[in-house]
Amino acid sequence: MLSMSSLQSIAAEKIKVEKNSQEFGVKLGVSRLIYSPGSMGQSISVSNPRERDYPMLVQSNPRDYPMLVQSRVYTEDMKSKAPFVVTPPLFRLDGLQQNNLRIIRTGGDFAKDRETLQWLCVKGIPPKADDLWAKDKEGKPAVNKAVSLNLKLSVDNCIKLFVRPESIKGHPDDVASSLSWVRHGSQLKAVNDTPFYMNLSSLKVGNTDISDIHYVPPFSSYTFALPKGTAGKVYWTVVTDYGGVSKVYQADIK
């Protein structure tokens, strides 16, 4: 029969396992990439969790754990492989270490008058106690069986990769004010007449925040659902090329 202290210990360990599983993953150096079709490629850094990024994880598991890092580029629907290669496609990344990925175009016929959206997905595969690749220099497992229970989640980190032809000058936030807004009952349509993807960071109508926001494709539109009773001007911000947030734009609804 288990004592009360034993039950408390088991409960505490369960909480620890759940927390560590949620916080374990790789980190990418940027939140988006701008790719010129004629370039020789783009680079991005990937790192195993650092203390400043995952302080609770490092405190509870002070040892450094290696991960397998697997990368691929997908088309906008995230179902088909895009005409890019990532090097290295699969490699071991030791704990608290960093490496660079190189994304290189291998083909594809991209639009010359607008951006094309692709997705770079980088998966961090955590080690198990019996994985040969996870052994240290002395051939010993880099992770014990008890801790491996905490690390069984594979985190897939996907960021936008915008293929931007050289004919397009400037940045999305330079022309984000040109978005127009049309209301149809309980729906609000955003019309984008620019060659850029407009990645909304925030959207508000009157005093009401629209929580379910989405990017608006170039020379296209996207329709948002409006909460009941929403009225007033539209206020919005967009994500910049550097991952920051633009100034606030505003417009009347047509």
Image (tube, grey):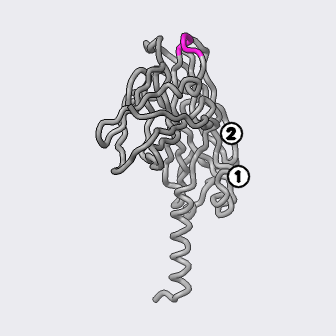
In this rendering, position of residue 166 left or right of residue 94: left
Q: Helix, strand, or loop for circle 1? A: loop
Magenta residue check for 168:
yes
Distance (Cα) linking label 2 and label 1: 14 Å
Q: Earlier in the sequence, mark 2 or mark 1?
A: 1
Q: Position of residue 25 (x, y in %)?
A: 57, 48
Q: Amino acid at mark 2?
A: Gln
Q: Which residue is mark 2?
A: 98
Say if 186 sits above or below 161 in the image.
Answer: below
The residues colored magenta run: 165-169
Which residue is at 55% across, 23% downward? 175
- Image disc number at residue 173: none
For this rendering, which residue is in front, 224 or 32?
A: 224
Say if 43 sits above or below 37 in the image.
Answer: below
Q: Which residue is mark 1?
A: 52
Residue 72 appears in view: no
Res. 16 image quadrant = bottom right
Which residue is at 44% across, 47% downward? 211
